Image: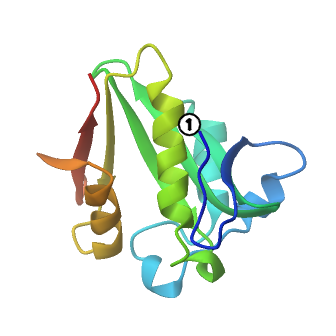
Amino acid sequence: MHFTDRQGRTVVLDEITDENWRAVADVAPADDQRRFVAALGARYLLLSMRGGLWNSLAVRAGEVVVGHVMWAYDEEGGAHWIGGMIIDAAEQGRGVGRAAISALIARLTALPSCREIRLSYHPRNTPAAHLYTTLGFAPTGDAEDEELVAALPLR
């Protein structure tokens, strides 16, 4: 599948490598998003490296790393989870986040074990709520810490 932002750039998810990890670590959201996500992509990279659960991916638009997203599989609950998405402040509002989440949904649904995709977001993060709702995620009524859980049923 092919995913593009509003500028027509191809948006892809790359594995974290020796060549791109620094660019991912330096990704910083807009100031008004820092109450909802980490201040830098570095925090999410460390969670992936040290936590043993999350898998980090670089978000690239064209040839430039512009964000980070991670995913995990919850064996107990049987769901794949999306977390830790940051789009660099300079790239926000260009459709990169939508393309990145769409690309991750396509990647996860290709896995034989994927039956449902879940994510969580802060209830005051209205841009995230709008994005996820328009992509088909619906609130489950569950919460993770202070965040609402939404699910995208697949099969």
Left or right: 73 as drawn, with respect to 99: left
The quadrant in which the N terminus is found is top right
Rendered residue at 54%/44% (across/down): 103
Residue 35's place in the image compared with 128, above or below, is below
Q: Relative to 115, say whether 29 is above or below.
A: below
Answer with left or right where residue 57 lies relative to residue 96: right
Q: In percent of the image, x 65 and y 45: which residue is there?
A: 57
> Which quadrant is the C terminus positioned in?
top left
- Specify how the rendered protein is coloured: rainbow
Is residue 151 in sight in this rendering?
A: yes
Residue 151 relative to residue 53: left or right = left
Residue of label 1 = 51
Indicate the secondary structure of the residue bearing disc 1.
helix
Q: Residues within 10 Å of mark 1 (few under 14, many from 20)?
A: few
Question: Could you tell me if residue 53 is visible in this image?
Answer: no
Q: Amino acid at mark 1?
A: Gly
**Please, is residue 25 above or below residue 137 in the view?**
below
Residue 115 percent coordinates (x, y): 32, 22
Name the residue: 45% across, 39% down: 105
Q: Position of residue 72 (x, y in %)?
A: 47, 33
**In this picture, is 39 found above or below 73?**
below
Report the front residue among 65 and 11: 11
- Residue nearest the observer in this picture, 44 or 51: 44
Q: Position of residue 4 (x, y in %)?
A: 61, 58
> From this viewpoint, which residue is outermost toward the right?
19
